[in-house]
Amino acid sequence: MENLNIGRSGIEVPFLGMGTWAIGGGSWWGDNDDALSVKAILTAVEQGITWVDTAPIYGLYHSEEVVGEAMKHIDRDKVVLSTKCGLVWGEGAPKDGRDISGKSIMKEIDDSLRRLGVDYIDIYHVHKPDHLGTPFEDTMSAMMKLKESGKIRHIGLSNFSIEQTEECMKYGDVEVIQPPFSMIDQRERSVLEFAKQHDIGVMTYGSLGAGMLTGTIRTLPDWDPSDMRFVFYDYFKEPKFSKAQKLLKSLDKIAEARNVPVAQVAVNWITVHPLVDTALMGVRNKHEADENCAATAWELTAEEIAALNEAVAEYERETPADGSPTKR
């Protein structure tokens, strides 16, 4: 799989990355077989998906631990490894878990390096702004010190607004952003446009809409109210659910004509989007890794892209502006 230079960072990554939130398991995703998760990571890397993204909060450390186990079997220099800071828990942690103070970041990096079994992180994202009033100068000062020390190579921001990103840029290098973006979630489009204008790399998450764009959810879900998909995404409920189903019909048409899974159509769409450099795809097992990799074996035609863009535009027009999904 061809690698791309993203933004001005000099980072070379494929146009698909591997997201490991679900691999963390826990209360959000349920129990996983760690051996299968490790195999999924190894399969993806072997097939050219050499960007692996994780975070301490995913499974409360467990995702980083599983990725660390996989890294024992991978040439470190062949993988772009990204993780995050700013979400903490335990005694003394803020109620909402957000802490982007320099003091907290300095502790988090060493813990992440230990769990991952590496001596540097390629891309270190600040996961979310906090509500403690931490000055971005303090946050970025810590990030720059980590970059200068060699513990991290590039600085990223996840779930930051344009205004927050601009403020961070005053105090250090913002080389990459990681916002949510998909056919059914374009609330951060302006952030992506800002990044492009400033030559900042764009690595998106949520590409398959938490499963909606796989085409496997066709009836209104009756999941437990605490299900993470209800918590984070509003299109699993009406009025957006039926609109999303209408959008899926456009993907169905292409999937049927090409004899491929619906998810591969969504993957192809986002990888050619002009605002996206590279997109994360979550996987939990080898089968899912194989499916994502298979999506790179073919490309949408200009006519297919135009038809999908029109369907996306119609979805945007028909869905209410309020009740946007919560950023993970």
Image: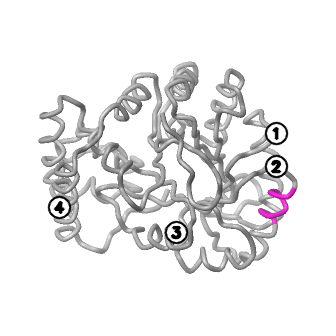
SS of the residue under disc 2: loop
Q: Earlier in the sequence, mark 4 or mark 1?
A: 1
Dominant SS in magenta:
helix
Q: Gap in Å between the C-alphas at discs 4 and 3?
A: 24 Å
Q: Amino acid at mark 1?
A: Asp
- Residue on which the image places disc 2: 151
Percent across and percent down for residue 101 are 77, 67
Tags 2 and 1 in contact by the CB under 8 Å rule?
Answer: yes
Q: Is residue 117 above or below residue 121?
A: above
Q: Which residue is mark 1?
A: 119
Residue at the image position 84 percent from the left and 50 percent from the top:
150
Going 51% across and 41% down the picture, which residue do you hit? 14
Of residue 96 and residue 234, the one placed in the foreground of this image is 234
Q: Please state which amino acid type lies under the numbered disc 3.
A: Ala
Q: Amino acid at mark 4?
A: Glu
Q: Residues within 10 Å of mark 4 (few under 14, many from 20)?
A: some
Which residue occupies the foreground of this view, 87 or 17?
17
Looking at the rendered structure, the kind of residue marked 2 is Lys
Q: Mark 1 and mark 3: span between their CA atoms?
A: 29 Å
Q: Closer to us: mark 4 or mark 1?
A: 4
